[in-house]
Image (tube, rainbow, N blue to C red):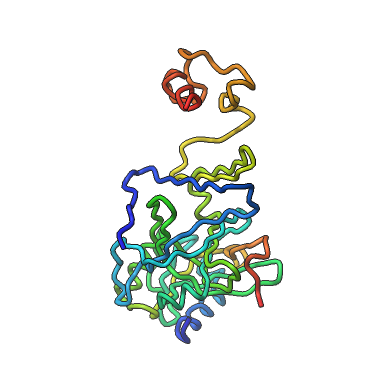
Amino acid sequence: MNAQQEKSYKFFVDNIASLYEEYGNKFLLLHKSAVIEAFPSMAEAVKSGYEKFGPGEFIVQQGAPNIESNMAKFVGLLVGVA
Amino acid sequence: MNLPIQQNPILSFTAKYTNRVLQLRTGIHVQPTFNSNGVEAAINPPPEIWDAIWDTGATGSCISQRIVEKYKLVPVSVSGITTPTGSTHRSVYVVNFYLPNGFVIPGVSAIGTELTGFDALIGMDIIGLGDFVVSSYEGKTAFSFRMPSLHCFDFVENTYMLPRNSQKGPSRNAPCPCGSGKKYKHCHGKISQK
């Protein structure tokens, strides 16, 4: 992830509750720390991101009430955090 | 490399092992869904075969850093992950998974992370899209997966799935208990005789 994507992710995390209020569970296309558009599916949002900005120039995050609720969970030790 | 790709709207494969196994592993091909110009790539699996583990204890699917580096994947999202050793966040990539028997799942959101001894983890985001059955008949593990889901596998309710010598099934001309509307002899009665 490059610095611009990191910044957009931080914007998403910092504003997750208000973005959820505005967009619900939609998939948000983010570019330069701003929501460009909300989509009903990940595929549509990613496709639009590539068309509008190109690889590495955007991120897509699904709206959620808090950051914990859209975390992937791994109960086994196959995936670990160093 | 041209692998046969299933065109049937019902996609399926069965993995059979020669003994009872404690991990469900299959070889898969992984292809970036979008090429370096951001254009959707044509369905055409790369030659590399990666070792994948099927994990019902994972809510999402993962790929190793080896796969990320091999295909120079560019992240499209970020996912928080929670594991027994802690929580963090990782980049997410969009890839096509080529499962055995020409079974393609395009546009998988896969988390890139450190994996040791295997290169892909197939979680409930994929398993939960279809029917997934594991058996250990005669001490040999087999598992079968298909998409979309077509049937509820309930081994308590669906006693017609039992071998003929363990219970008396419906009569041949009776409606099949699976609810297909067909006669038993033309539906699961036919299957169980094979």
Residue most toward the right? B85
Quadrant of the rendered structure where residue A32 is?
bottom left
Please state the horizontal and vertical placement of residue A4, each as a whole percent of the image.
Answer: 45, 85
Of B82 and B156, nearer the camera is B156
Please state the horizontal and vertical placement of residue B64, each as a whole percent of the image.
Answer: 52, 71
Of A64 and A19, nearer the camera is A64
Q: With respect to residue B53, does B181 lie above or below?
A: above
Residue most toward the bottom? A3
Please state the horizontal and vertical placement of residue B143, each as a whole percent of the image.
Answer: 54, 45
Image quarter hosting the N terminus of chain B: bottom left
- Residue at position x 50%, y 82% from top? A6
Please state the horizontal and vertical placement of residue B40, each as a whole percent of the image.
Answer: 30, 67
Side of B149 relative to A37 (left or right): right
Residue B76 seen in render:
yes
- Residue at position x 54%, y 16% from top? B170
Task: Count numbered badges in the picture.
Answer: 0
- Residue at position x 47%, y 17% from top? B175
Of A24 and B97, nearer the camera is B97
Of A18 and A13, nearer the camera is A13
Q: With respect to residue B176, does B152 lie above or below?
A: below
Quadrant of the rendered structure where residue B35 is?
bottom left
Residue A21 seen in render:
no
- Residue at position x 61%, y 68% from top? B81
